[in-house]
Image (cartoon, rainbow, N blue to C red):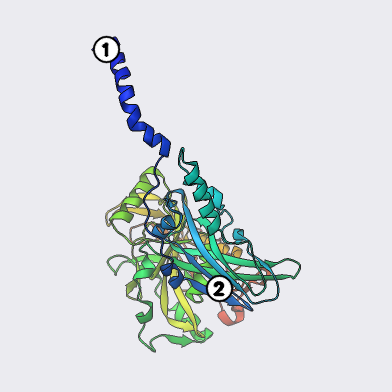
Amino acid sequence: MNQAMKSRSRLVLVPLLVPLLLPLLLIGCPAMPQGRFDPEPILRRAERRTAQGVSVDLAALSAAEANALVGFDITKAGIQPVWVRVRNFEGVRYYIPPISIDDDYFSPHEVAWKGHRWFDPAGNRHLDQHLRGLDLPEAVEPGGMVGGYVFTNRDEGLKYANVELVAPGQRKVRRFPFLVKVPGLRTDFQRVNWQHLFAPGRQQDLEEPKFRRWLEALPCCTLGGDRRTPADPLNIVLIGSADTVLPPLARRDWHVTQTLSVTSAWRTLVSSLLGRPYRYSPVSSLYMFGRPQDIALQKARGNVNQRNHMRLWLAPVTLRGQPVWVGQISRDIGVRLTAKTLTTHKIDAEVDETRWYLMQDLFFSESLHSFNFVSGVGVSTWNHPRTNYTGDPYVTDGLRAVLWLSSAPVTYHRVVTRWPRSESNQPVPDPRRTPRP
């Protein structure tokens, strides 16, 4: 076919295609069909915090709930509505700054704009009005109650939100930290039956001298997948309930890990090969107390090959009634081949540096109440390094960091060394220092 005939064919096809394309241009790209929004599941799982004469209820919406709420797919834009209700029985007016919940939150019109369609001004106005009606009011009057949504950046599995109420001129601030579950993501901590993890009376409560000896008698390391070979060192101990331990980590961008599945394995592969972020990438199971980790957390960078990650186990002892978490923390710096698992993440050999990183994170989240160190890991130097389950060498001063956490803010100058040297017989090390040849 010569060029003239091709041109004539295009001219003939254009008028035939216009009637087909014009309806799409007039209505724009149709919104993704959404299900009917049902608020009942959100109300049932909402958590409540109360202080003085104020109470706050909060729930984070799943992807399906969020899309049904607004009428189009906002999860692709990385947006997650958080429902908040405030009751005020005090005699002052409280402002509710959404920036305390997410310092990079989205405005209602910004969200609505993402759902606007071409050549549909009436529909777009309706969407604008709908989103304005969902917005959380800026203040709650004395004796009043308000509710609405804050459009935050999307999280999966767990959502940290800090609601602050401010009464200007009254010198009153009410703070309500939340760590709520988000339906839709299967995570490691969800597989644990927390109510039956220990038989009644099987958790021994210890005083501090016995507790120190118990910590020092723990094995040096976790066990690998064969449950026999020593893996990464047990180098951290956190003291406090899950409601005390997890929120400060979430504030510093630590995220729960997804359980291993076809979907999560594919997302991990894509993240590794294409350099895409994946905040919930699975971690392999290591073993302590005869079971895999109860909680795995990670602080991701650009992709899964570079991240800080830790595994925590709820211990069979408590310290004066406080839960104890024994764990392992290390930094992934790349990927390498291994005979045991084909491929594995390579860890930074200076595991003490990652222990120090965690201490800094808790310090700057104003959640570290006190700390000290105990022996038990065993010294490993550059001349004589030890190796983990997959053969990566590591060096350490041989100590475990013991960290007491607080649910109330602790300013920097109030963080103390828990055990005096005369009691612990253990010098407080420079946590950045690793044994050298």
Q: Residue most toward the bottom?
A: 201
Residue topped by disc 1: 5
Q: Residue at x 47, y 68 (%)?
A: 180
Q: Is residue 196 above or below residue 176?
A: below
Q: Quadrant of residue 363?
A: bottom right
Residue mark closest to the camera, 1 vs 2: 1
Rendering coords of residue 95 (x, y %):
66, 65
Residue 364 in view here: yes
Q: Which of 64 and 10 is in front in this view?
A: 10
Q: Residue most toward the right?
A: 169
Rendering coords of residue 256 (x, y %):
43, 63
How many numbered marks appear? Answer: 2
Q: Nearer the viewer, residue 112 or 20?
A: 20
Q: Residue at x 43, y 87 (%)?
A: 204
> Is 354 placed left or right of 230 in the picture?
right
Which comes before the other along the chain, label 1 or label 2? Answer: 1
Rendering coords of residue 116 (x, y %):
48, 44
Residue topped by disc 2: 405
Residue 166's label in the rendered image is none
Tell me the element at label 2.
Answer: strand
How far is mark 1 from mark 2, CA to CA?
A: 79 Å
Q: How crowded is mark 2: few (under 14 residues within 10 Å), some or many (20 or more)?
A: many
Q: Is residue 92 above or below residue 436?
A: below
> Is 41 placed left or right of 319 in the picture?
left
> Is 407 placed left or right of 77 in the picture?
right
Tell me the element at label 1.
Answer: helix
Q: Residue most toward the left?
A: 1
Q: Nearer the viewer, residue 245 or 428?
A: 245
Q: Which residue is drawn at 29% across and 69% down?
A: 227
Q: Disc 2 residue type?
A: Leu
Rendering coords of residue 48 (x, y %):
52, 74
Q: Disc 1 residue type?
A: Met
